[in-house]
Image (cartoon, rainbow, N blue to C red):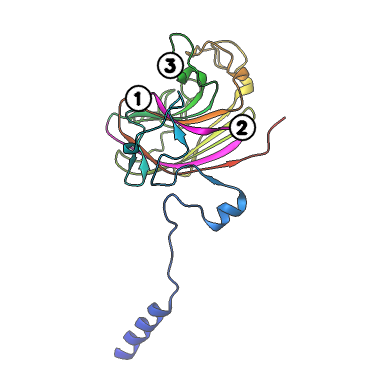
Amino acid sequence: MACKGWMVVIWLAAAPLVVLGQDNQLTAKEKEEGWELLFDGKTTMGWMTPKRKALAASHVQEGALNPHPTDYMLTHEKEWGDFVLGLDFKISPKCNSGVFFRTSPLEAMMGKDVGFNGLEIAIDDTKTNGYHDTGALYDLAKPSRNAMRPVGEWNRLVLTSKGPKISVEVNGALVNSIDLDKFDKVGLRPDGSQHKFGNATRSHPRIGFIGLQDHGSDCWYKNIKANRLATTP
């Protein structure tokens, strides 16, 4: 028995160590594939307000970006066309946040916030799967289910935006797949029901800014990485 015990110890000592990826860094494979790191985990470099003003260092909290409080959203400085965006998020109780994309222009319309200039993947402290719940294309397309973990736990979001096709994964589950070309009537979804935006979503700009929404609650984002895709004609 003693001999077998030593054999187990020796085997464990010889076993390879599993090295987990570190937060807010690109792996060698991601670098090779062309991914860009949008947040370094330490500073607000690369981020601004929608009015292109600098951000307070206090938005960086324990290796994550917290958009609260700011002028509606933290905005990444680059414009993005077709892309895949991956990030981790964690919310506080009663949180209302979201990931904006194709926000263009950054100048708000008269009487409206800048959110009307973009598309938003909703992130909210809810357990349902309606037009304003986590994984929804806000007010436009419901997720198939709410795959978010409980408040205080980290979640993984992957957004693919390519031409008219938008897809959303939450914690590895595909929860939304949208064809914007079907939104061809002003103020209406494909099923004929009304949404809040005064346009035909099909005509929304297909290039714009990425943003992390502040709607009055703490929330945290890290491991924010994006990869540009070949532009759809």
Categorize mark 2 by other alpha carbons within 10 Å: few (<14), some (14-19), many (20+). Answer: many
Residue labelled with disc 3: 113
Asked whether 192 or 162 is in front, the reply is 162
Q: Which residues are magenta?
A: 71-93
Q: Point out the image quarter for the C terminus.
A: top right
On the image, which quarter does residue 171 sit in? top left
Q: How many marks?
A: 3
Residue 185 in picture, x, y percent from top left: 60, 12
Q: Which residue is situated farthest in the bottom direction here?
A: 3
For the residues labelled 3 and 1, the Cα–Cα distance comes to 11 Å
Q: Dot 1 surroundings within 10 Å: few (below 14), some, or many (20 or more)?
A: some
| Residue occupied by mark 2 | 81
Q: Which mark is residue 149?
A: none
Q: Amino acid at mark 3?
A: Asp
* Dominant secondary structure (helix, strand or loop) of the stretch shown in magenta: strand
**Of 161 and 48, the residue lying toward us:** 48
Residue at the limit of the structure toward the right, as seen here: 233
Q: Are marks 2 and 3 in contact (CB under 8 Å)?
A: no
Say if 145 sits above or below 32 in the image: above
Q: Which residue is mark 1?
A: 215
User: Residue sitting at 54 percent across and 11 percent down?
Assistant: 187
